[in-house]
Image (cartoon, rainbow, N blue to C red):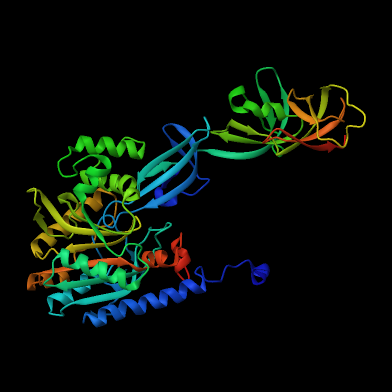
Amino acid sequence: MANYSTNEFRSGLKVMLDGDPCSIIENEFVKPGKGQAFSRVRLKNLKTGRVWDRTFKSGESLEGADVSEQNMQYLYNDGEYWHFMEPETFEQHQADKTSVGDTALWLREQDTCIVTLYNGSPLAVAAANHVDLEITQTDPGLKGDTAQGGTKPATLSTGAVIKVPLFLNEGEVVSVDTRTGEYLNRAKK
Amino acid sequence: MSDNVNTGIQWRPTASNDALIKRARLLAQVREFFALRRVLEVDLPVLGEHTVSDPHLDSLSTEGSQHYLQTSPEYYMKRLLASGSGPIYSLGKAFRANDRGRQHNPEFTLLEWYRPGWDESQLMAEVADLLLDVGRTPNAVAQRVTYRDIFLATVNLDPHRASLAQLVQLASDIAQRNMRGESRATCLDLIFSFEIEARLPPGVVFVHDYPECLCALAQLGVDDQGETVARRFEVFLNRTELANGYFELLDASEQRQRFSEDNRQRKIMGKDNIEPDEKLLAALDAGLPSCAGVALGVDRLLMHLVGAQHIDEVIAFSS
């Protein structure tokens, strides 16, 4: 991979730091009247999600990280790995629990999601912002409650448990915001 | 804006009309200030055969003729002083490659002036007068503090006497990485820029008597504690660095040595060798009068007067 000098640091640039791939969030140029200039850089460690603040001398460089984001189709889970496929090449990738994380709660087979690849292997998986999932278990709805704001827990086909309005029943499909885990609306089947 | 709908090209100025009016007024005020004090305005080349060797400055050069856009008018001004110009100022553009940030644009407006027969203390007083004159400086009374005192008060270290290991330790804590192998000067610059600058008092603050390793082009002196110090000062306005001044180095042989030391540093940093400016050296050989000089960032001052957060807001068309 190419090396990037501090004056090429831009938000979104992927670099290696302490052996981990990181994404640059911010780069602030600081220079005293005379003398050494610095870059104060905020980076997100793409493996751990932790945010680091590091200061570099201007002109120092970091190795680029082989990180890319790709849309892939989620195929299935074999109990240990989640399998994804690139839509154009049909190339398949398997991701472990660490890289899939909580996103597993929103993965429906054949849905398209965003897989972050590091050196060709999945590093992280993000679901689409909105997904439609079927309610597999919830207490029966009560008549006449449609106008009121009450909610009840519902289990979805992926195992996620969310709060839904009282009038919804098992077998119905709902739209969920995967970033917040919130119910959005009733979806068409 | 409707005119952007068709092309998407951002052709409008980055500065507001109000900022442009204030810029025009500020430039006029500066010229009036110096006219009343009988300091001569000199209009100097921005394109020159030579450029500074300072390893921390990168010049922009022209293709073909291999000239440099000047990072400051300093060398020309010193040649004028050596030829007997008397007090002079320059108000014009300067260029520094790779400087881009909230407070940096590669092309910027620099006010630089020299006072033959003065020392840095007299010049600090004149900078304070100028800031008061152009107005809206929050504290009419400028404060002066030594580099040592502000270090002691903020990080509890004596910048002259602390060991290199102590400085590296503190710099590493601030940078969140191991700074072992870095010089005293780099550690001090890092500590000052990130830990001290933000905690300076508001208003106009002069920091003076720099450590010897940060002397740049200042003469050395001895302070009241017997410490060798650089007779250099920096001016901060609401914690933003605004100007840098010296009781100027006059010695041609010292300047020669500085050129070769800079080039040695540049080589380590993988930067091009800069040919020494022989005309400057010849002028210094002929004799530069004892003088104090200072360079002030006009765009930074304007940011303060306008209340701008980014330098683009005070530059008609930013790079």
Judge whether residue B94 can be spotted in this image.
yes
Task: Please indicate whether residue A50 sits to the left or right of residue B242 in the image.
Answer: right
Task: Please indicate whether residue B132 sits to the left or right of residue A100 in the image.
Answer: left
Q: Residue furthest top?
A: A79
Task: Please indicate whether residue B85 sits to the left or right of residue A63 in the image.
Answer: left
Nearer the observer, B151 or A176: B151
Report how many numbered discs are placed on residues in the image: 0
Return the x and y of residue B58 as percentages of the image width and height: 32, 59
Nearer the observer, B285 or B134: B134
Return the x and y of residue A176 as percentages of the image width and height: 75, 35
Judge whether residue A1 can be spotted in this image.
no
Nearer the observer, A61 or B234: B234
Residue depicted at x 75% and y 34%: A111
Q: In the figure, B31 relative to A1: above or below?
A: below
Q: In the figure, B86 relative to B261: above or below?
A: below
Image quadrant where residue B205 sits: bottom left
Q: Quadrant of the C terminus of chain A?
A: top right
Nearer the observer, B147 or B289: B147
Return the x and y of residue B162 as percentages of the image width and height: 17, 39
Image quadrant where residue B138 sits: bottom left
Q: In the figure, A45 relative to B88: above or below?
A: above
Return the x and y of residue B279 as percentages of the image width and height: 16, 72
Q: Residue furthest front?
A: B140
